[in-house]
Image: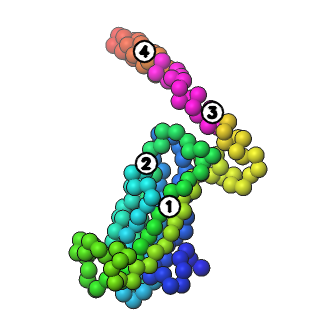
Amino acid sequence: MPAGEDNQLISVHPSDLKFIIELGKQSFCDLKVVNNTENHVAFKVKTTSPKKYFVRPNTSVLQPGDSCLIRVTLQVQREYPPDMQCKDKFLLQSTIVPPNTDVDDLPADTFNKESSKDIREFKLKVQYISPSAQGNSGDEGSSDSNSDLLKRRRQRRNDPGFSFKFAAIVGVIGIIVGLVLNLYLSK
């Protein structure tokens, strides 16, 4: 059965947000939200860590049977979370709205629980995945290899390497070869 319960106005796929954590890079997860009713349904996405995630659209109105793709972007991480654990959560609220309601026309209290509206809630958990574990989920001993990988990445990030020197040398050689060819061909 799709993510969500029988009494939900909408279904959400997948039911958990999974982010591949790479330092210095944003990571994203797409959610598909489907209106399971014959009514217009408004939804809103809330999170326990709003500064850490960028959600678009975070509020919308779906026509009967319509669907919407939501992109949740995890902002750039400067360090790996301890044990790759995450306690962040998302809440997707939904409620029936009058036909032809535009998202800009939604009253401020649309998703307020104290209002008389029937507001349904769907909770999503967040999981962090290391790039090396992406294909190895469930391997024993992978935490040791993950920590080795993280150490190597940190060392590599602090080592400037030879890439600039190499590019400069190749550039100089290219100029010399170009001059020699120019002299040779101009005779």
Q: The residue under label 1 is which amino acid type?
A: Lys
Check if mark 2's residue and mark 4's residue have beta carbons within 8 Å.
no
Segment colored magenta: 149-165
**How far apart, in angstroms, are the residues tagged by discs 4 and 1?**
54 Å
Image disc number at residue 148: none
Residue 138, given in percent of the width and then of the height, sits at 72, 55
Q: Is residue 112 visible?
A: yes
Q: Mark 1 highlights which residue?
A: 89
Q: The residue under label 4 is which amino acid type?
A: Val
Image disc number at residue 151: 3
Q: Secondary structure at mark 4?
A: helix
**For the residues carrying marks 3 and 1, which lies nearer the camera in this image?**
1
State which tag comes first along the sequence, 3 or 1.
1
Magenta run includes residue 168: no
Q: Mark 2 highlights which residue?
A: 75
The secondary structure that most of the magenta stretch takes on is helix
Quarter-of-image position of residue 55: bottom left
**For the residues carrying marks 3 and 4, which lies nearer the camera in this image?**
3
Q: The residue under label 3 is which amino acid type?
A: Lys
Q: Is residue 61 visible?
A: no
Q: The residue under label 2 is which amino acid type?
A: Gln
In this rendering, position of residue 106 left or right of residue 84: left
Q: Secondary structure at mark 1?
A: strand
Q: Is residue 33 above or below residue 171?
A: below
Q: Mark 4 highlights which residue?
A: 172
State which tag comes first along the sequence, 2 or 1.
2
Residue 173, given in percent of the width and then of the height, sits at 45, 15
**For the residues carrying marks 4 and 1, which lies nearer the camera in this image?**
1
